[in-house]
Amino acid sequence: MQTQSHAKTENPTPLNRQEMWDQLSRSTDMRSSQDQVLWSIFGTFWAANAVLLVALFQSGKLPANHWIGVIVAITGAFLCFTWHILQRRALGHLKRLEAVMDALEKQLSVESTFALSGSINKLGYDEHVGHLRFSARKIMRVCSILTTILWFIGLIFFFLHPDNHV
């Protein structure tokens, strides 16, 4: 049995043009807010990693007690994994909102030059964004995965070298 929030309406009431424009405006605002959330979390992610690194190297050397390194590495790996999950959710919301915007612009027959959607304004998108080799979204994903791997490498190091006088 589906919950009401997931149930599909059998006969949805179609939106009139003004309601579609209003919905497009709301979708654009929500997309912008979600993008800000994503970048705020990304900044917090790097700040938290920096704090953990400072804790790890506060004397300029590796900690003499390997358990400190183990705890910091576990915390770092957990932080990165959590960031990866939060990031996937935030990126999913962005994609969903962009799909709504795209559908509304198509339904409203927005001229491609003025469309916000990259799939409608393909020329503008390709000229300003599409030619870039890496997207910010891909870089964010790689950062969360790579830093998780690095913290696990650190964890293995601290387990294998209990007498850290390197």
Image (cartoon, helix red, strand yellow):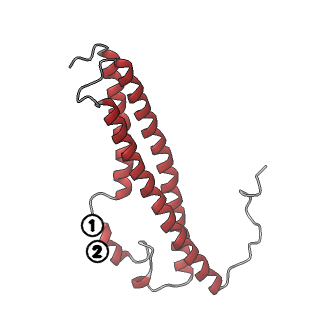
Q: Is residue 164 above or below residue 133?
A: above
Q: Residues within 10 Å of mark 1 (few under 14, many from 20)?
A: few
Q: Residue at x 52, y 51 (%)?
A: 89
The image quadrant where one finds the C terminus is top left
Q: Amino acid at mark 2?
A: Glu
Residue occupying the far front of the picture: 59
Q: Residue at x 39, y 19 (%)?
A: 67
Q: Nearer the viewer, residue 76 or 86?
A: 76
Label 2 – label 1 distance at C-alpha: 7 Å
Q: Residue at x 60, y 76 (%)?
A: 23
Numbered circle sitting on residue 131: 1
State which quadrant residue 107 falls in: bottom right
Residue 157 position in % (x across, y down): 30, 22
Horizontal relation, residue 100 to residue 117: left or right? right
The answer to whether the residues at label 2 and label 1 have Cβ atoms under 8 Å apart is yes
Numbered circle sitting on residue 127: 2
